[in-house]
Amino acid sequence: MKKTIIYVFIFLIILFPFTAAAESFGSIAKSSENLKTLSCFVTAESTMNHRKSRIEYTFSFKRDGLKMRIEYAAPKNMKGTIIALDGKYFYNYIPALNMKMKKKINPKSTRNPGKEMGIFFYYVKGNLAGDVSGMKITFRGKENIDIEGRKSRETLEADHYTFTRGRERQEVWFNSGNGIPVMVEIFAGNKLKLKMMVSDIKLNEPIDDSIFSLQR
């Protein structure tokens, strides 16, 4: 009887982390499904092409019509540049060249603006569970992480997951409170390609449709 109790206890200890991980990712996937709008500030560091670069931009998204807007705050030569989609048209504004562009979106195009943001964009689109279904998912545990924002840093409790497929690996930290990915590291093999930090988050608050064109 004593041995049986010990075996059951050991089984529960082994099972608990996997159960907790499944429940955690389930709630993250659910928060992805429930997202209607998102506004935030993104800081991204790229090491592609053997050069390190840093960009900062405000990101706005509205699920209704898959509307998106990116407005760059840094580097200096890109400040004020806007990329926007209103569901029908693609807009681009480059203040350094005083150039505006408006182009009708081809619904058959396989180009997916935002895909370079990895798991963050899968989350925003609303089908996180489906988009990562072909990846191996490993729960690393809860961690306190520092997120660099527009003007300050903040410490958050996050659920750390690893997503792998072939040579692709993404380390993702989801805010334990609302499920939003607040830090993403994208690797090719062992080489870090992109690191993103997400701050100043406004979730499911009204966003005026005018910002998804060049009206303002």
Image: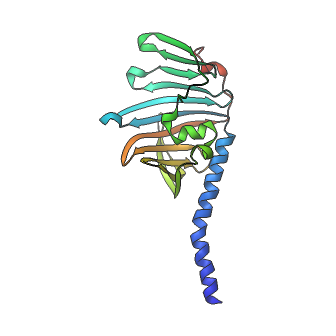
Q: Which image quadrant for residue 210?
A: top right
How did the renderer colour the structure?
A: rainbow
Q: Residue at x 45, y 35 (%)?
A: 43
**Residue lying furthest top:** 98
Residue 208 location (% of width, % of height) = 66, 22
Q: Is residue 213 above or below residue 190?
A: above
Q: Residue at x 63, y 41 (%)?
A: 127
The N terminus lies in quadrant: bottom right
Q: Is residue 147 left or right of residue 85?
A: left
Q: Residue at x 62, y 48 (%)?
A: 28
Q: Nearer the viewer, residue 36 or 101?
A: 101
Residue 42 location (% of width, % of height) = 49, 34
Residue 143 location (% of width, % of height) = 50, 55
Q: Is residue 103 above or below residue 116?
A: above
Q: Nearer the viewer, residue 215 or 149?
A: 215
Q: Nearer the viewer, residue 24 or 166?
A: 166
Q: Is residue 181 above or below residue 85?
A: below
Answer whether residue 141 is visible to the viewer in this image.
no
Residue 69 location (% of width, % of height) = 56, 25
The C terminus lies in quadrant: top right
Q: Residue at x 56, y 15 (%)?
A: 103
